[in-house]
Amino acid sequence: MTGKWNYLPLTTEEQKLENELARRFSSCEPISELLVQRGITSVAEAEKFFHPSLRDLHDPFLMPDMDKAVDRLNKAMGAKEKIMVYGDYDVDGTTAVALVYRYLQNFYSEIDYYIPTRYDEGYGISQKSIDAAAEAGVKLIIILDCGIKAIDEIKYAKSRGIDFIICDHHVPDDELPPAVAILNPKLEGSTYPCPHLSGCGVGYKFMQAFSISNGIGTAELEGMLDLVAVSIAADIVPMVDENRVMAYVGLKRLNTNPNMGLRAIIRTCGMGGKELSISDVIFKIGPRINASGRMQSGRELLNCLWRATARMPTPGRLPSTSTIKTVRN
């Protein structure tokens, strides 16, 4: 296999910026050049690149439909409707469901989760899953890492009295499903600053917005960033902007205090007591999580992840479901 490499030298303006970065950070020219080629255009951006901080996460309400999604979730909880958290059977989907389901469980009990089986139902939403949800009395499904192309399935769900909130990151078609809210940074016309979120990352932003809407502290949610880091690495999304921040903080969590489900997988990998890198997540942790959904059912893996996710004291519950806000101030 042969290929032709096109090396694009820096422009005069970029060379000036490279020199400025090299002086500021006492770095060698190749590192400064790489920063410029990564789109780092100022010393302030370089500071954020070298020192990722949760303060640099974007306002989740910048994502289209976020206010609608939070409003519908708050209404469901206020009316004590049954909610289902639904996700794909791969790493991104199972980590997303574990995060959203476990976090909402802190405040609400009428909630369940669903992972389709690869061989019986296939990818995404199936009529079988919708029928099961309807029979269980579910009125709202939060779907993660899939659903953006499930037009007919969501139409069928509406006919059975079930609303959908879609949290996806795959490129949509021209026609969108009739969901009450679609959270996807790749939607046409979206101006969300980080279009490369993983499915679990979109779920994290949804829970972040829910927390802001209800005045809930973020310590518990931030404690679940190890799940987001695993999804970012395993799904090979660009590790820039918010993804870099969440992967950085989440990898620290993996190395210091991972949830017990991930801790067990780390030990199975023979990595207990060793410093984990993103490569370890991609090539050792990720494939073991994927194996569950590919060989039998992702539900077994999810049972392991969500039951072991709580590591911190449970925050104060909301005063009552009747006081949950339905709009953002």
Image (spheres, grey):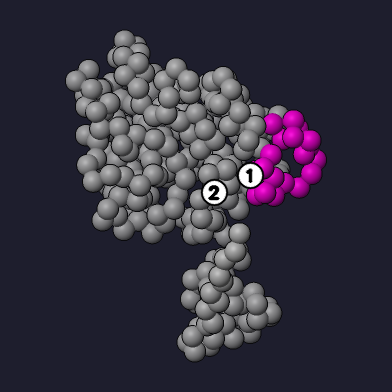
Residue occupying image coordinates x 25% and y 32%: 151
Residue occupying image coordinates x 56% and y 26%: 294
Quick one: label 2, few (<14), some, or many (20+) residues within 10 Å? Answer: few
279 in magenta: yes
- At mark 2, the secondary structure is loop
- Say which residue label 1 marks: 282
The kind of residue on which mark 1 rests is Ile
Q: Of marks 1 and 2, which one's residue comes earlier in the chain?
A: 2
Where is residue 117 shown, x and y percent of the image?
Answer: 47, 20
Q: State the extent of the magenta-drawn residues as a range.
A: 265-284
- Of residue 318 and residue 259, the one placed in the foreground of this image is 259
304 in magenta: no
Specify the quadrant of the image occupied by residue 190. bottom left
- Say which residue label 2 marks: 236
In this picture, is 134 found above or below 248?
Answer: above
CB under 8 Å between discs 1 and 2: yes
- At mark 1, the secondary structure is helix
